[in-house]
Image (cartoon, rainbow, N blue to C red):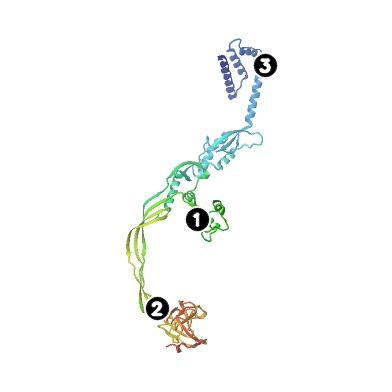
Amino acid sequence: MAKKFNKLNKFKGLRKFNRNKQVDGDINVKEIFESTMEAAAAEPKNSRFTQAAKFAERYRIWLLVIFSILVVIVLGWMGLVNHYMGYEYSYNGRVLGVVKDKEDVLKITDLVQSALTEERNIEVIIDKKDDITFKRVSTMGHVHIDSSEEVLKRMTYVGDINVKAYSITVNGKRAAVVDSKDSAKKVLSAIRKDYTSDGENVVVENAKFVEDIEIKEVNTDLDALQKKEEAKEALQTGAVVETSHVVMEGETLAELAADYNMTEEQVMELNPGIDPRKLELGSEIKLLEEKPVVTYETSELITYEEDIKFETIEKKTDKLYEDETKVKTKGKKGKKVITARVEKSNGKESTKVPIVAKVEKEPVQEVVLVGTKERPPTIGSGKYIYPVDNYRLSSPFGPRWGRNHDGIDLACPMKTDVHASDGGTVTFSGYKGSYGYLVIIDHQNGVETYYAHNSELLVKEGDKVYQGYHIAESGNTGRSTGPHCHFGILVHGEFKDPLKYLP
């Protein structure tokens, strides 16, 4: 048994010698053969290996020739195999192409990493050992061998390049990924700013995220990286929860889907068996709604001003008609300064408790006079009064400027109160040609009165008015040369001189 091991060891030594010679590229057949002879000489006499050595010595020349031919054939075959073999290279399991040598990929990796880092302004990481793998493949046939430029292009535009980034984790779960720790801090700061009041009158007592939030360094796909605005939105609206809605009268599937940013198909998938054409009144529908991933709670002391309502009291007077009112003293609101503790969740007020209230200005009581005098009739009495006070007759009834003036002009300041000359019903209130803003009252006794050129109308068609009722404000509208009230009396369809009917 020991002899067998010795022979095996010597044979292994010979193979090692042969491989070394092959690697060095300087193959000497003669040296190989002589080495074999030396190994045989070291064996005990009469052994099989010794007999073989004698045979080899006898036919030394022929064996040397045959051995040389075999070595050339083996080396030629190995060279041919090497010529038609290559490496299929992959990034994170995704096959990108085939190269002749591994170095064709590895020497470009650093270049790709630097280029992407500079382009994306973030540290790109390509682990040559873990991320890039090779597989020995045959290149015979129509297999395309990538050039250095093609390797660079494929590596640059691969979609799942790893980058060093920072994740914002909420209760241990990754909620957003940004390029740097500073960006992550800015995202959280922006959320705090959104949900915290700002101003001189605000003191923040306490503010915190309810959830456990951490910023961690991670390796992630380049495509998974988020901009700060996207990360902020993901934290504020990224969660989706199931809720229920009670169907109200008239609601449709399309309206509910739109209100909850869902499709009709999604609603039906959550609610199998519902009739999409008509929702059952009072039934519960399952829906999905967006919910913030993070909750930011604040407790703030806020100082603000608040109006104090004034009190209104009524006083009766016989100088006004029944149901007629007039403000004697106009009320004024007071003002107080309040400091309150306001609790908020994601900017929405949950509780508000006043702590201090200081009155800055007392309110002024409003006094309203309420009439008690019996209201006159709203039909004509046949007795008429001038429609305005403090007037001047500026143009009488009769011919004027080549035509008939169908009333009298009572000059008065703008915005003078215009009153009904007698009780009746308003049959017109609006703009009418040369009259401007006009009111016509039918006194239901065959007489109508006209009030023209007003600046403002205070009654509408159908209103019942009594003598002295405030119907308009005088003005200068229509065909007019100055502020005044044109007053006309129409008796059975014919204009008459109003002065004959006035006191």
On the image, the x and y values in percent for residue 67 come to: 65, 19
The local secondary structure at tag 3 comes to helix
Q: Nearer the viewer, residue 425 or 480?
A: 425
Image depth: mark 2 or mark 1 in front: 1
User: What numbered label is drawn on residue 245?
Assistant: 1
- Mark 1 burial class by Cα count in 10 Å: few <14, some 14-19, many 20+: few
Q: Nearer the viewer, residue 202 or 258?
A: 258
The local secondary structure at tag 2 comes to loop
Image depth: mark 3 or mark 1 in front: 1
Residue 67, above or below 118? above
Q: What is the CA distance from the residue labelled 2 to the residue labelled 1?
A: 53 Å
Residue at numbered disc 3? 62
Q: What is the CA distance from the residue labelled 3 to the residue labelled 1?
A: 99 Å
Residue at numbered disc 2? 322
Viewport quadrant of the C terminus: bottom left
The local secondary structure at tag 1 comes to strand
Viewport quadrant of the N terminus: top right
Q: Which residue is at 50% across, 43% downward?
A: 118
Tag 1: amino acid: His
Quadrant assignment, res 101: top right
